[in-house]
Image (spheres, rainbow, N blue to C red):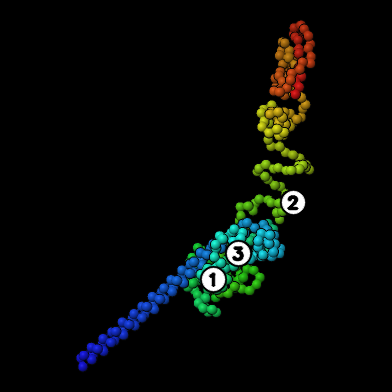
Amino acid sequence: MQIRTQRGYLLLELLAAMLLATLLAVWAVDAMVGRINDAAAQASAAWMLSLRDASRHYLERHGEALKSAVHAADLLDKGYADWSAPALAELRADGLLPAGFPGRAALAGARVRVFRSAACPGPGCRLDALVHSDAPLVRAPAGPVDEQAVAQWMLASQGWGGSVRAAQPDLIGGAAFRFPNPPWPGAALPPGTVALTVAGAVAQSQDSDFLRVGDHRDPDFQGPASVQGDVSTGGDLRIARHLHLGSQAMLYAACGQEGAVSREAEGGLAICRGGSWRTASRSGGGGFSVNQMRGCYSNQGASTANPLTGSCSCPVGSAMVQISDSGPQAFPEGRTLGYLCLD
């Protein structure tokens, strides 16, 4: 009887050990599957973050055309069949994605949608893009949302991620954005859809302050424009009103660009000619007279110096030609010689 009882206890212990081993095995398999699913969600988020960067570059590169586009094929010359829905292959062809970028991630593929504010085209125009999964993250086809996969994907999205929740199917958003579902005309994205936003990238672009030919803000450059560099034209430059020169030149000082025009320090125009600034408002190099008693002054004390040089001399490059001689004069008149400076 005692042997039978011992055998019964041994059998129960064996059954308990087998049950425990089975539970541990099931738990280990379930944990392994969970880790695999978590890794797939993280890989999908990393893949979509790369696609988000490409979408941001798409907005920056084609922003002006996107803000004024009327028809879906307005960017066809750039390689995009529909400007509002650039495909992965088109982004690759445009150099915005690596040539070997995969077409889908572990959990789902993705689509890019671009949408605009009502102010477009205009100064208040705003462009946004949404990169969203092409299928919801669910436990099984037509099954409930896989909340664990969505949570892992959100953790890996670096704060840029959002999703459509079953509790609020009319919204899509997360910590960084919130839009109606969908932000564009059409069918709503199903619960479990995950998305990344590229919000207002063009509105904040550093190039938006600069005026371009055909710019919707001033298509014909009809307003004031400031240019920091040189302006070159292959034709005539016509000015309806006035030309204002900010530079100032000293007459007969050296200049480096033949034909350049500047303002004289005393007023008038100066032209760079022969390597030095020459007056454009008076002809020739001026003139002066010298008295043997008083130098560059008359007997009334007035200066007889050359107004262009401020002394009894000719500008550099001018020839001094005598034009008068008063002859011998008694004191205090003295003899006076007059000269003309010829260029």
Q: Residues within 10 Å of mark 3 (few under 14, many from 20)?
A: some
The residue at 48%/67% (across/down) is 42
Q: Which residue is mark 2?
A: 220
- Disc nearest the viewer among 3 and 2: 3
Q: Judging from the image, what secondary structure is the residue with disc 2 in?
A: loop
Q: Which residue is mark 1?
A: 108
Judge from the rendering whether residue 161 lies leftward or rightward of residue 28; answer left or right.
Answer: right
Q: Return the residue found at the far top.
A: 330
Residue beneath disc 3: 89
Q: Identify the image quadrant of the C terminus.
A: top right
Q: Amino acid at mark 3?
A: Ala
Instruction: Pick out the residue farthest to the left.
Output: 2
| Image vertical order of residue 181 relative to residue 314, above or below | below
Q: Can you give x and y, in whole percent of width and height, for residue 52 in the image?
A: 56, 62
Q: Position of residue 265 (x, y in %)?
A: 69, 30
Q: Secondary structure at mark 1?
A: loop
Quarter residue 255 falls in = top right
Residue type of the residue flagged with mark 2:
Asp
Task: Looking at the image, tell me whether mark 2 or mark 1 is earlier in sequence order.
Answer: 1
**Count of numbered marks:** 3
